Amino acid sequence: MSAPAMPTSLLVYEGYLARQIYATFGFVLFAFSGLFFFFDLISELNSIGQHNYKFGYAVIRVALLAPSRLYEIIPVAALISAIYIFATMAANSEYTILRISGLSTRHALGALAKIGVPLVAATFLLGEAVSPYADQLSERVRLEALGSSVSSNFRSGVWVKDTLDNDGAGRPVMRFLNVGELMPDATIRHVRIYEFDHQFQLTDVRVAQRGKFIPPDHWQLTEVHATHLSKPTSLPPSSSVVNQKPDLLQPIYHAAQVALPEYLMRSQLTPQILSVLLVAPDRMSMLDLFSYIRHLQENHQDTQRYEIALWRKFLYPFTVWVMLALSLPFAYLHTRAGVVGVKVFGGIMLGMSFQLINTLFSHIGTLNTWPAPLTAATPSLIYIAFGLIALRWVDRH
């Protein structure tokens, strides 16, 4: 007669465990987010006082970085809170009583999987709907207050390739754009455009002081100096004298220059594509990463770094389940195996090691051109295998 009562007792246990883990999770998340807020604010102190960058702007910037910090912390916070609860239950012999009552390891893993669902959803929403846009806004607040622009590793600015099958006049065009400055309001300044035809011959060079995007696919350039290059219509006859040197003064191209107050240029580049310069790839949304990867592929450019970032972004919310699975073996360790504080410290080290290995594999995968899905999934697979092996060992002993 005890078999029918088993599901009810499991539901009671799951509810009790969920309440305990969620309460501890909230406390751990609050503590870690406050710690990161403090350190981020300390790092901004060197910029306070420059131009119009006051303490209030620093606080706003750091507050806008908070969603990204929460996104990074959630899996580790889930691990620490679950370890604390299981270690406490083991110290009080609560988990032993639950096992005697019929709780199996499989049921415990199932309960943790259910508890992890809201945390996985919260991680996904933070990573897609909140943190990428908060990071961009944070960077814009800082740049506007400092009166500066987005920079790159090149002294000349940012270089972007743009390819069009039809430039509006029925011609295929390939351009290389050199953007000197990308302003926080998504306008561009000090723009140089080098345009090539389908035979890879340079045809036009345009230099503009500034540019503004006009949806859906045009840039309005102002104060433009345009140079059009063309071959002479009639070439001089080739010399009949053998070994005679060509006339170096004979022009190969004709150049026509014109100054334009405005020029409307059709382009595949959008402020969303250029906005990748505001944040690191691992802080972009999957939609922005996918859009930028497609842009790079259309222009035959390397996408390895961004593909790895896309797969990491996709898989990262599921690491909550990996962390919860890693916490379960601690429920089988009794007080003699270590006090609760030592187990929690071990959980912190375990979570930090996962973050380090996850980042390390990302860099190694980029350098060795490993498949992006494998590079992103390997750390989680290693830790879930480690957790299941540890769980099997403690369950037998």
Image (tube, grey):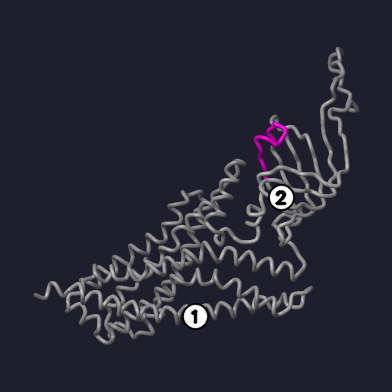
Q: Which residue is mark 1?
A: 30
Position of residue 369 relative to residue 145, above or below, is above
Mark 1: which amino acid?
Answer: Phe
Q: Residues within 10 Å of mark 1 (few under 14, many from 20)?
A: few
Q: Which residue is mark 2?
A: 214
Q: What range of the chain is rendered magenta?
A: 161-173
Residue 17 lies in magenta, yes or no?
no
Label total for image? 2
Q: Residue furthest front?
A: 215
Percent position of residue 30, x then y: 49, 80
Mark 2: which amino acid?
Answer: Ile
Which quarter shows the C terminus? bottom left
Q: In percent of the image, x 71 and y 46: which residue is there?
A: 218
Which of the 4 image quarters holds residue 274? bottom right
Gap in angstroms between the C-alphas marked 1 and 2: 43 Å
Q: Which is nearer the eye, 199 or 226?
A: 226
Q: In percent of the image, x 64 and y 79: which residue is there?
A: 42
Position of residue 34 relative to residue 284, above or below, is below
Which quarter shows the N terminus? bottom left
Foreground disc of the pair 1, 2: 2
Prevailing secondary structure class for the magenta stretch in the rendered image: loop
Asked whether, in this view, residue 295 is left or right of residue 13, the answer is right
Which of the 4 image quarters holds residue 59? bottom right
